[in-house]
Amino acid sequence: MPALKAARPTLLRPWREAVWRDQDYWAWLLLILGVLLVIRLLALFFAETDLFFDEAQYWSWSRDLAFGYFSKPPLIAWLIRSATEICGDAEWCVRAPSPILYTVTSILVFLAARALYGDRIGFWSAVVFATLPAATFSSLLISTDVPLVLFWTLAFYGWIKLIETLEMRFALLIGVSLGLGLLAKYAAVYFLLCVAIDAWSDARARDALRGGRGVVVLTIALAFLAPNLLWNASHGFATFSHTAENAGWKGFPFRLDDGLEFLGSQFAVFGPILFAVLIVVAWRAARRGCEQPECRLLAFSVPVILLLILQALLSRALANWAAVAYPAATILVTAELLRHWPRLFRVSLWLHLGAALVITIAPLFAKRLTALTGPEWNPYARVVGWHDLAAATERLAAAQGAKSVLTDNREVTAELLYYLRDTTLPITIWFRAQTPRNHFEMTRPFTEAAPEPVLYVTLIQTKTSVLKRFDTSQPIGKQQFPTDAVPVREARFYLLKGYEGDNAD
């Protein structure tokens, strides 16, 4: 019996301690990430969810490649277009870049952590990052955060190596990564703030910016962003105006409830144990100071979170807006837990694996969840029923002889453009404001040139002002969606004729 007890820790040590040869870390990491990637791709393929309207909007952008779009820089559209050219326009293919890019990002986390702490912490940092609740959820949809976090992490790795070697090639790497990150989402500019904070506290970081290296980084990043800047200049700086409006700063007093809500959401994004440990480490550093590489990791995580807490206090901040803080935070917290609280590390990892299992499997039962819980409790209520809505629209348009389709909001427009992608019917949106409020109002507003009769599709349950602008507006039906589960929305359909004209009162 004593011999058996002595042998047990040895048998478990490879997974409990993970002390292997360098090639073993690579082999195990690639195996784990490969298995995760296959599982996530299969989950996408078999999911019952329709595209979220933001996803559908990004797909519509990908049909008309440009250097900019109303609300976002262009990289998300280019990414979707690349994927759909390979595997088609099905929902799983539109979303497929996400798990693939998260796999690459996890490898970059490994490289960055290895450069700071060695192979063991690098390995576990990558595993932790790949299984974060936010990473699992985000890998099952397509969003601008996915390429943003990838190129942020690549730039952070370049920054670590630039400080270590002072080689110009890493300045080039940072510049390219930052430029591509800005083309994904303007939040990549936070990287410059983090670099400034790091350089302020560390002489080696300041040296890394000298010798023209800092100028090279900024020059390359601006060169990548320049086409988007020119696009904005020719479109009234639409993306910048939308971004400023989205920030929605309203001054004082602070919105304390929104600030606390955002802070609380980060426990779900990063994981409750990991975020609590991050707070402890940051508080300890604020009181007692810190040493490298802890200071550097704090500089590339905590300022972003604090900035967005301030944003939430002034207006609002969505939970995902702090996504770029978590590659560095993952390395920091993983190192802290493995060195001081290994049991807590294992608890956190198992907790995240359990959450990942639920998050990955749940979309396969999205419609049945609605039937079980009702739409108000179903987290997937916003991504079911759109395919049914589009099918009903197409069916009624054919039955009524409609020559075009009119909507009155961005969500319906995006979903119809995606799910009626093979139709020849023009799809337009009602727009009578002074300036466009979304990409569709800018690119496909309804005008008197639209062929009649017009099929008007709306989710508004009362008569709208749109109906008053036509000589006749005939109700032709209403339908609840989805049709094979508990409905989460109801659409009304009207056949419109005799538009009064764009200059009518």
Image (spheres, grey):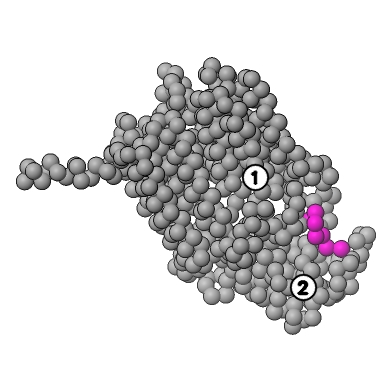
Q: Mark 1, residues whose alpha carbon is within 10 Å: few (<14), some, or many (≥20)?
A: many
Q: Mark 2, residues whose alpha carbon is within 10 Å: few (<14), some, or many (≥20)?
A: few
With respect to residue 292, does 148 lie above or below?
below
Based on the picture, tell me whether residue 97 belongs to the magenta stretch.
no
**Given the current orientation, which residue lies at the most extreme bottom position?**
399
Image coordinates of residue 319 in percent, x first then y, are 54, 44
Image coordinates of residue 267 in percent, x first then y, are 45, 41
**Given the current orientation, which residue lies at the most extreme left position?**
1
Q: Which numbered tag is attached to residue 494?
A: none
Left of 123 or right of it: where is 429? Answer: right
Image coordinates of residue 473 in percent, x first then y, are 81, 74
Image coordinates of residue 469 in percent, x first then y, are 86, 66
Label 2: state its secondary structure: loop
Which residue occupies 41% across, 37% down? 122
| Residue 201 visible to an observer of this rendering | no
Q: Amino acid at mark 2?
A: Thr
**Given the current orientation, which residue lies at the most extreme right position?**
503
Image quarter where the C terminus lies is: bottom right
Q: Amino acid at mark 1?
A: Ala
Q: Which numbered tag is attached to residue 184?
A: 1
Q: Where is mark 2, residue-wise?
A: 424
| Residue 225 visible to an observer of this rendering | yes
Which residue occupies 56% across, 42% down? 149
Which segment did they paint magenta?
441-447
Which residue occupies 71% across, 56% down? 61
Based on the picture, tell me whether residue 442 belongs to the magenta stretch.
yes
Which residue occupies 37% across, 53% down? 354
User: How far apart are the alpha carbons under marks 2 and 1?
Assistant: 31 Å
- Residue sitting nearer the eye, 402 or 190: 190
- Residue sitting nearer the eye, 330 or 462: 330
With respect to residue 223, does 381 lie above or below?
below
